[in-house]
């Protein structure tokens, strides 16, 4: 297995062999080349080499799909994507790998590639590379021209820094080189050109590879830059090495090899703007506003524009893809029992219900409320709010639903879809999702500690029915005390309902437990407010929550995102 795979998506590329030859001449590490011939064969076949893999498609799949395919084929630790018309510094591969941490994307310094000149065969006059000449500037020759290959990097311009503008369109940023943070051999850059970049192969898939929803081409630099930075990693230019890129902007037979229509370019840009300006990428930890502020001042981005960018990362609701259609058999496996006392802010209640409808994957919902509710199959109990009422609501929901496995869900928990991916391994155990953060409604303060909560409970319906029938019977007879506890199987006190045990799991992303004035249980955000410090293991106060983004001072914005999605 090589250390580095260089992926070259190629479409009608005249200089692919030159690029491969240059790479093989200048590599100094265990590096291979994977060339994707995307819907064409070169006029002259590629020379075979032990470090070259060739993949051919009869029909073009597009630059993004071809790049993804090349990375799938690779078994190397690092992957690099480069265009099929580039030259490289000696030892560029080992220099880049030596300075590439786990969550880094690195790009070499860029020069322009002077690949060839046109030579007039009548007067020997040479002109700079471009479309096939129609007339010699020095004589009357209109037909006899020859390409003279040079294949060398031009010393000027020397390009290190790039950015995108307010429309997320690529721009050079030469002025950035004067900034203090730009002075080292490894320096941050806001964006990059899609012609050459490198990262670890595992990192590539952590970032979801190339998003083919953009289309074949366009916004690649913005995509890689935003994924690199907003995921919590870095995008750096390595000035210790370089590559040279041939720019073909003159059209004719010296233009972009992929056929790109104007509407395709606009489609890619519209998709990119919706994704990044809306903070809709599932794996981002920072909003786009954070990135612009990090590099501020950024040309084209005035304070008003930055201020108007969303400052929170939306929930799954705003970018959920169509989930698998469930068969009737699959729907009979898992179900949700939702219970509410109808005593909370309608915005919170509405956001939670909307989130549940999006993320529960079509599983049946039975809602048990104290007032009529248009949510799932609704059952109304004419009771006053109390602990006993809550237990009766849960029991009623369990008696109404007919699925094998049941999730208990509450009216003030924002559930992440990964919560409902869980399947209880045993039929005699209560399971609690402990990946839950408490968020104080009034200021967005976030708090985590390990806890078993009824709102995170999942178990087989039969086990839950037996427990809650016994619980309701005991409370009706002797009343409820905190020593009995709310959570089945969570303690060994003599007041427990039964002898069943419990276990825990952690969903991929956390749920949000909203702490508001109407909670049945007290909200406590100070360690000294708890009688036992053993009950608050893992105590963590924070201003932001993984996946959900910053919550401190911005909780209303999170609700707005869910409600408007």
Image: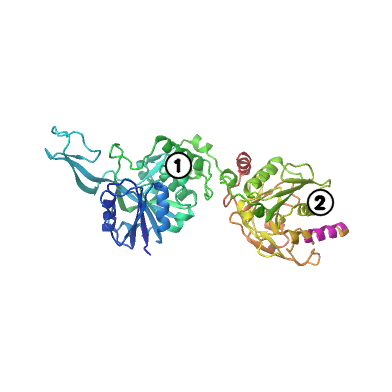
Q: Quadrant of the C terminus?
A: top right
Residue 517 can be seen, yes or no: no
In front of the other: label 2 or label 1? 2
25 sits to left or right of 169: left
- Residues at discs 2 and 1 in contact (Cβ within 8 Å): no
Mark 1 is surrounded, within 10 Å at the Cα level, by few (under 14), some (14 to 19) or many (20 or more) other residues, namely few
Residue 114 image position (x, y, % from top left): 24, 45
Residue assigned mark 1? 296
Q: How many marks?
A: 2
Q: Quick one: 167 or 81, which is closer to the camera?
A: 81
> Could you say whether the residue bearing mark 1 is in a helix, strand or loop?
loop
SS assignment at label 2: helix
Point out the tag, 2 or 1, that comes first from the N-terminus. 1
Question: Looking at the picture, does residue 219 appear above or below residue 481?
Answer: above
- Residue topped by disc 2: 389
Q: Position of residue 305 (x, y in %)?
A: 49, 35
- Which labelled disc corresponds to residue 181? none
Tell me which residue sits at (37%, 59%) in the image.
Answer: 4
Look at the image and give the residue range highlighted in magenta: 466-476
Q: Looking at the picture, tell me which residue is in the foreground, 543 or 385.
A: 385
- Predominant SS along the magenta part: helix
In the rendered view, does 377 fall on the left or right side of 361?
Answer: right
The residues tagged by marks 2 and 1 sit, at their Cα atoms, a distance apart of 55 Å
Q: Residue at x 45, y 58 (%)?
A: 202
Q: How is the image coloured?
A: rainbow
343, 460: nearer the viewer: 460
Give the residue furthest to the top: 140
Label 2 crowd bin: few (<14), some (14–19), many (20+), radius 10 Å: some
Residue at 41% across, 56% down: 71
Q: Is residue 444 above or below residue 75?
A: above
The location of residue 138, given as percent across then percent down, is 14, 34
Q: Position of residue 487 (x, y in %)?
A: 74, 59
């Amino acid at each position: 297995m090589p250390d580095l795979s260089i992926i070259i998506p190629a479409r009608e590329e005249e200089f692919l062999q030159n690029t491969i030859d240059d790479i093989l001449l200048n590599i100094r590490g265990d590096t291979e080349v994977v060339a994707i011939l995307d819907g064409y064969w070169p006029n002259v076949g590629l020379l075979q080499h032990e470090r070259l893999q060739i993949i051919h498609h009869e029909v073009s799949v597009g630059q993004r799909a071809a790049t993804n395919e090349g990375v799938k084929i690779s078994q190397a630790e690092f992957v690099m994507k480069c265009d099929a018309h580039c030259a490289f510094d000696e030892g560029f591969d080992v220099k880049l790998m030596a300075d590439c941490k786990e969550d880094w994307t690195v790009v070499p310094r860029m020069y322009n590639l002077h690949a060839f000149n046109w030579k007039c065969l009548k007067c020997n006059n040479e002109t700079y590379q471009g479309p096939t000449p129609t007339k010699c500037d020095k004589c009357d020759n209109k037909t006899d021209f020859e390409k003279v290959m040079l294949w060398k990097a031009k010393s000027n311009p020397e390009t290190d820094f790039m950015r995108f503008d307010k429309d997320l369109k690529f721009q050079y940023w030469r002025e950035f080189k004067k900034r203090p943070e730009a002075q080292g051999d490894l320096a941050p850059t806001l964006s990059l050109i899609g012609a050459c970049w490198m990262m670890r192969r595992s990192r590539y898939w952590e970032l979801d590879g190339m998003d083919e929803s953009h289309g074949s081409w366009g916004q690649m630099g913005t995509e890689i830059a935003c994924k690199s930075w907003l995921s919590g990693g870095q995008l750096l230019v390595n000035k210790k090495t370089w590559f040279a890129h041939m720019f073909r902007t003159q059209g004719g037979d010296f233009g972009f090899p992929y056929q790109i229509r104007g509407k395709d370019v606009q489609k890619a840009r519209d998709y990119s703007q919706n994704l990044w300006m809306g903070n809709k990428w599932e794996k981002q930890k920072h909003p786009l506003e954070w990135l612009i502020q990090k590099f501020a001042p950024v040309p084209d981005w005035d304070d008003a524009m930055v201020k108007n960018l969303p400052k929170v990362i939306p929930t799954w609701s705003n970018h959920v893809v169509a989930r698998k259609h469930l068969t009737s058999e699959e729907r009979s496996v898992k179900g949700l029992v939702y219970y509410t006392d109808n005593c909370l802010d309608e915005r919170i209640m509405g956001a939670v219900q909307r989130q549940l409808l999006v993320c529960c994957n079509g599983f049946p919902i039975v809602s048990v409320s104290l007032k009529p509710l248009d949510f799932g199959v609704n059952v109304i109990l004419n009771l006053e709010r109390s602990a006993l009422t809550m237990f009766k609501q849960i029991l009623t929901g369990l008696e109404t639903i007919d699925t094998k496995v049941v999730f208990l869900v509450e009216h003030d928990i924002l559930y992440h879809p990964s919560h409902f991916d869980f399947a209880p391994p045993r039929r005699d155990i209560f399971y609690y999702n402990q990946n839950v953060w408490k968020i104080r409604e009034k200021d967005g303060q976030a708090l985590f500690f390990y806890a078993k909560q009824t709102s995170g409970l999942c178990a087989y319906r039969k086990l839950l029915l037996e427990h809650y029938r016994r619980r309701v019977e005991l409370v009706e007879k002797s009343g409820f005390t905190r020593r009995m506890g709310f959570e089945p199987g969570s303690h060994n006190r003599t007041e427990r309902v039964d002898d069943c045990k419990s276990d825990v799991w952690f969903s991929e992303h956390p749920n949000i437990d909203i702490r508001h004035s109407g909670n049945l249980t007290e909200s406590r955000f100070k360690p000294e407010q708890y009688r036992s410090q053993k009950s608050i293991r893992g105590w963590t106060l924070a201003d932001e929550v993984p996946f959900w983004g910053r919550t401190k001072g911005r909780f209303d914005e999170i609700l707005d995102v869910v409600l408007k999605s």
